[in-house]
Image (cartoon, helix red, strand yellow):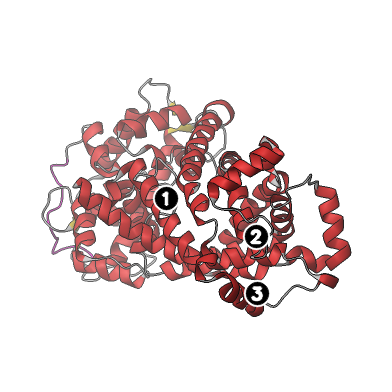
Amino acid sequence: MSGAGHAVEHHVGLDHPNRSGSSSSNHPVKKSGQVSMDHVLLALRETKEERDTRIRSLFGFFDAASTGYLDYAQIEAGLSALHIPAGYKYAKDLLRVCDANRDGRVDYQEFRRYMDDKELELYRIFQAIDVEHNGCILPEELWDALVKAGIEIDDEELARFVEHVDKDNDGIITFEEWRDFLLLYPHEATIENIYHHWERVCLVDIGEQAVIPEGISKHVHRSKYFIAGGIAGAASRTATAPLDRLKVVLQVQTTRASLVPAINKIWKAEGFLGFFRGNGLNVVKVAPESAIKFYTYEMLKNVIGDFKGEDKDDIGASGRLLAGGIAGAVAQTAIYPMDLVKTRLQTYACEGGKAPRLHTLTKNIWIHEGPRAFYKGLVPSLLGIIPYAGMDLAAYETLKDMSKTYVLRDSEPGPLAQLGCGTVSAAFAATCVYPLQVVRTRMQAQPPNSAAPYKGMSDVFWRTFKNEGYVGFYKGLFPNLLKVVPAASITYMVYEAMKKSLELD
């Protein structure tokens, strides 16, 4: 895959007869903060006139219609012509950074100002990595810089990184190669951002929304992602615990069930804290479930990649969906006993509103029903995982494309727009697989001394349909959907806040 820098030189048609070689013995050693455009010109072995011609040619490449300015459509078309992956064109950000007077257009002077600032910025970080000050970045210097930034990278990845930036394949990175790779990258050129830019442009196809974020396995701070995700999940589940309790209570009702009577019953019997019964287990599940899902997902990507004869990051949307679905099934199976105990705790009928102790409840299930009881309802639970992920994914991508076309006028959706698309797609997918949730919950909640115990999943389906009709499969759906918006919003906000506090970005 060609990067931006490789394509810039090719499409603009520039020829650099004075291009520097692998190193320069007369390369100046400068102290931080003393970099000027003269230093940049010297590093590029380029005259001021040659640089002016190069920048004018690049502006003309984007301004194909010779309008004298660049707008969003022209910038996006130019980036597309450079074969930059659609998800990382940065057209909107590039327009914003270049457009100094905020008129929605970029004239040549604004474009030139961006080029000056960007080349100076790139030269400063180039100098910081080039510790030997010989005019080039050696692979070991790049590796040292990545390690100091807290990024773990193996020899194979390092070789791919250098190979992608190193246009003449001489094993080192000159400043010209460094500049070409990052010239149109509109964000701050820190070593962390540069690594993630390379990772995304060269390794990761993010056209589909994966179950688990790509790239975390390569980062030394991946444990912090679990911390951020765990705290975000705990905050989200605690905030929506009353709705979860109501959902479960309504799901197990085989007679007519209404939301308001269920609320009154819990309030009168147990008070405010009654709405949070079982939330402790719900929160405890977050960390192990996420960890198991993540590591299983990474392992399965390798297996699928080996089977297809491809790199694990090139297994495509179907491969990621399969790996994510199986990883979700493994994680669900591993923590399922906790889920069953949580359901029993939430539906336990007790006098005086006092819930049984967790240890006592778990012990009773083991003694009276045996170890297999902890997996009641597992089959319908697993059956819903891949369909849910597939429908969520399809709906999310459809809504994102629609928002780009009809609402955002071809600009990339921002965080809030993505959150909205994710919320609606999750609600749609949850509604589609909801009957399986009802069946699972009823199998989980059934006590051992039930007068007419369920014989299995098909028995629950038949008796629910026979006695309650289609409506029976959607009991508790309303509070379940009410959870979606606050759960997604709280998870997003807390996760972003935790990322900043843990310095993940």
Decide whether the magenta segment is chiefly helix, strand or loop: loop
Q: Secondary structure at mark 2?
A: helix
Residue at image position (49%, 53%) is: 379
Looking at the rendering, the stretch of residues picked out in magenta corresponds to 16-28
- Sooner in the amino-acid sequence: mark 3 or mark 1: 1
Q: Secondary structure at mark 1?
A: helix
- Sooner in the amino-acid sequence: mark 2 or mark 1: 1
**Is there CB contact under 8 Å for labels 2 and 3?**
no
Q: Amino acid at mark 2?
A: Ala
Quarter the N terminus occupies? top left
Q: Amino acid at mark 3?
A: Leu
Q: Amino acid at mark 1?
A: Gly
- Relative placement, left or right, of 25 versus 356 is left
User: Residue 357: x percent and y percent?
Assistant: 69, 78
Q: Is residue 156 magenta?
A: no
**Is there CB contact under 8 Å for labels 2 and 1?**
no
Q: CA distance from mark 3 to mark 1?
A: 31 Å
Q: Which residue is mark 1?
A: 325
Q: CA distance from mark 2 to mark 3?
A: 12 Å
Q: Which residue is mark 2?
A: 445
- Sooner in the amino-acid sequence: mark 2 or mark 3: 3
Which numbered dot is residue 361? Answer: 3
| Res 127 visible | yes
User: Residue 87: x percent and y percent?
Assistant: 41, 40
Residue at image position (32%, 29%) is: 61
